Image (cartoon, helix red, strand yellow):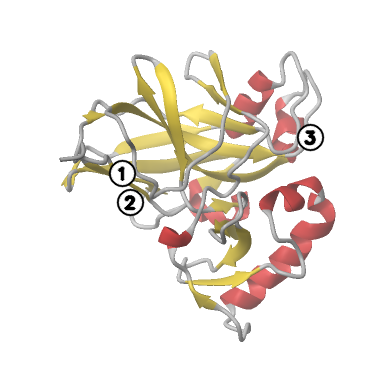
């Protein structure tokens, strides 16, 4: 299933289920209103959302409506932590809220995309099998840094269960293509191979992970820094470059006031 949080004036937004083709959505009201509720009672709530997803994909929900990514907050706006695991195994532990995919930046910054992983509770020193079993949802995020300091983290509109990834997901590994457009000009696509369970094992090496903790698998910094007036389109697609897995992050860097 695919999930998103629609802006409704609250800090957490309202949970919606999104169709497989990302064209339709339906409020999850009556099942759960926030993603954190789902994570806290995954075994009970997730199957109900899955049933709703099946009905939505078959066009059987009368109150479905067109999905609009621009109306989304980050899927989990207030996580219990955000930590990114680099390719060398080093961990960067961050803090703070996640921003929606369209929230503008206010200062020039360096772009560091990551596969975002949401897991259930995971005991300290868990192995890869336990970590994979605890994996709930995945998405796309991007850290923005100025002089090495984190200034913002944006998240793509959707988080999805592994079964929604199709051929992009096999044996616990995501194989995809990172596509970026800077001011409308396409950068060279980058092949991505990520093993989320390995990142979770690394984070849980010394302490247990709590439901709602977000783990990131670093996908390598883009060789660019946004300047005032710039725009960036960032998307993680299927390996053939056709299907968007999590919807794109579209950002503008606000020009200075006149």
Foreground tag (2 vs 3): 3
Q: CA distance from mark 1 to mark 3?
A: 32 Å
Q: Is any atom of residue 196 visible in this view?
A: yes
Residue 160, image x, y percentages: 58, 52
Q: Is residue 236 above or below residue 151?
A: below
Tag 2 near tag 3, CB within 8 Å: no
Residue 76, image x, y percentages: 60, 45
Judging by the rendered image, the residue that carries numbered circle 3 is 121
Tag 1 near tag 2, CB within 8 Å: yes
Report the residue at 58% width, 26% height from top: 95
Q: Nearer the viewer, residue 214 or 161?
A: 214
Report the residue at 56% width, 58% height from top: 9
Q: Nearer the viewer, residue 250 or 53?
A: 250
Near mark 1 (Cα within 10 A), the count class, few <14, some 14-19 or many ≥20, is some
Q: CA distance from mark 1 to mark 2?
A: 8 Å
Residue 194, image x, y percentages: 50, 33
Mark on residue 179?
1
**223 displayed left or right of 114:** left
Report the residue at 76% width, 51% height from top: 37
Sequence-wise, which precedes: disc 1 or disc 3? 3
Q: Residue furthest front?
A: 258
Judging by the rendered image, the residue that carries numbered circle 2 is 241
Secondary structure of the residue carrying tag 1 is: strand
Q: Is residue 171 above or below residue 217?
A: below
Sequence-wise, which precedes: disc 1 or disc 2? 1
């Amino acid at each position: 299933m695919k999930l998103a949080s629609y802006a409704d004036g609250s800090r957490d937004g309202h949970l919606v289920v999104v169709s497989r083709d990302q064209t339709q959505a339906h409020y999850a009201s009556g099942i759960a209103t926030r993603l954190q509720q789902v994570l806290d009672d995954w075994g009970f709530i997730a199957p109900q959302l899955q049933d709703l997803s099946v009905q939505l994909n078959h066009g059987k929900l009368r109150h479905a409506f067109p999905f609009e990514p621009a109306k989304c907050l980050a899927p989990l706006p207030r996580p219990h932590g955000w930590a990114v695991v680099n390719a060398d195994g080093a961990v960067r532990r961050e803090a703070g809220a996640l921003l929606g995919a369209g929230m503008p930046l206010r200062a020039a910054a360096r772009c560091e995309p990551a596969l975002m992983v949401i897991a259930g509770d995971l005991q300290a020193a868990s192995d890869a099998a336990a970590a994979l079993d605890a994996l709930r949802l995945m998405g796309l995020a991007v850290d923005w840094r100025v002089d090495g300091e984190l200034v913002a983290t944006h998240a793509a509109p959707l988080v999805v269960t592994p079964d929604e990834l199709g051929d992009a997901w096999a044996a616990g590994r995501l194989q995809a293509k990172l596509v970026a457009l800077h001011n409308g000009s396409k950068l060279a696509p980058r092949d991505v191979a990520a093993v989320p369970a390995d990142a979770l094992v690394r984070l849980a090496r010394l302490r247990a992970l709590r439901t709602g903790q977000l783990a990131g698998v670093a996908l390598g910094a883009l060789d660019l820094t946004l300047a005032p007036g710039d725009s960036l389109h960032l998307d993680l697609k299927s390996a053939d470059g056709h299907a968007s897995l999590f919807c794109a992050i579209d950002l503008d860097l606000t020009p200075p006031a006149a």
